[in-house]
Amino acid sequence: MTVHFLPSQVKVPRHILLHDQLTPAAKVLWAGLQLRPKNQEHLAQLCGLSQASIKPGQTQLERFSLLNPGPFPRADWAFLPVDLLRTKPVHPQAKITYAAIQLLPTFADGVAEATTEQLTQLTGRHPATVRRALRSLVDAGWLQVRRSGRTNVLQILVLNPQLEAQKSMIAQINRRLERAPYLGEAIMREWLTLTVDRDNFEDDASPGFLVNPYTGEELKIDRLYPPDVGFEFNGPQHYGPTDLYPNEEQARRQMGRDLIKQAICTQRGILLVTIHAEDLSLEGMLKRLPDRLPLRSLDHKELVIAHLQSVSRAYRQKVPLPPPVPKQACPPGYATGGNAQQYASR
């Protein structure tokens, strides 16, 4: 199953950006086509273009056999943020200039130094056109430009708010995972936070009715979405002794608590979903989400998703699989693969 979502940026090859026979609109159109638009109207929205300009751009791309260009080396790519791509007030030439700056030999860590003449030579545009493009990008918040100590040399800082937001999210995720006493449970929570469009949840929830009737012990749900959905992460120790938890009596007690918790939740109308290590992936978690929970948009989250996929894969490789459990009928309100299908059909 392939999950579709809108990335935060598009890779555009040098051959497209610096093509001297393509209009800026055609180059922007090429970038928009990489986002797999649903129709012409959607394509126009993604590119920040009028629908009337779509056909001429497509004709140009077809003329040069560029609708499906071949592979290009990594060094020949630049990045165009999707938010910039679909911004109508910014002219297509300014959008192409933003990406072309990344092809300068001085570009590193988001900063480049160049003269207006060097930018003119790179883009093949008139100096006045280059200056207008830079001014437009600065006004829209996509560039910071200042003169360096050398005469006529511009220091250009390329900004990408969506990319920085993802990097910040990844740093926060890493801090939470580092502090977590149980890594598998913590990874599950990160996937839930990313995919479930509900912020009213409680971790380690212990509602008053969730009590072991035999011992009086309060039981907890790893994550509860009130009023009627809970998630539990079960490692292999929930199904018997392990190298890390070798005590057989403790294993039996753990299995007993799990059964009691499940029974009480069922009695109270709470759907308690059990997650295992093999479920820790984007596709795996989407298959386990009940259809009564709303989905959060995954657009502009590709770096966060890739990071969680990597963390989950490393965890799965370290943790042994639990023994197989008998398949049970889906409880009411639980649609296997239903939410995953919603993403796949976007």
Image (cartoon, rainbow, N blue to C red):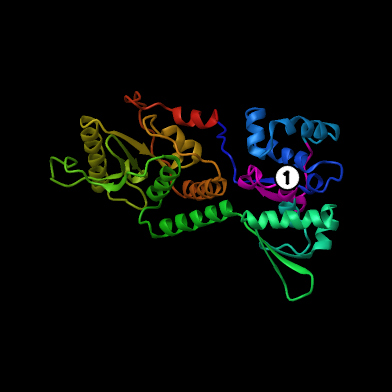
- Magenta-span inclusion, residue 274: no
Q: Bin the neighbour count of mark 1 within 10 Å (Cα to Cα): few under 14, some 14-19, many 20 and up.
A: many
**Is 289 drawn above or below residue 122 in the view shown?**
above
Q: Nearer the viewer, residue 149 or 273?
A: 149
**Is 224 drawn above or below residue 43 in the view shown?**
below
Quick check: 103 left or right of 227? Answer: right
Residue 66 visible in the displayed image: yes
Q: Can you give x and y, in whole percent of width and height, for residue 68 in the image?
A: 77, 34
| Residue 55 sits in quarter | top right
Image quarter of the C terminus: top right
Quick check: 119 left or right of 4? Answer: right
| Residues drawn in magenta | 69-96
Q: Nearer the viewer, residue 201 or 283?
A: 201
Identify which residue is drawn at 51% across, 57% down. 168
Q: Nearer the viewer, residue 155 or 339?
A: 155
Residue on which the image places disc 1 = 92
Q: Can you give x and y, in whole percent of width and height, for residue 276 in the image?
A: 40, 40
**Is 54 drawn above or below residue 183 in the view shown?**
above
| Residue 115 sits in quarter | bottom right
* Disc 1 secondary structure class: helix
Image quarter of the N terminus: top right
Residue 37 visible in the displayed image: no
Q: Can you give x and y, in whole percent of width and height, for residue 54 in the image?
A: 73, 32
Identify which residue is drawn at 78% across, 59% down. 104
Quick check: 21 left or right of 296? Answer: right
Q: How many marks?
A: 1
Identify which residue is drawn at 66% across, 34% down. 44
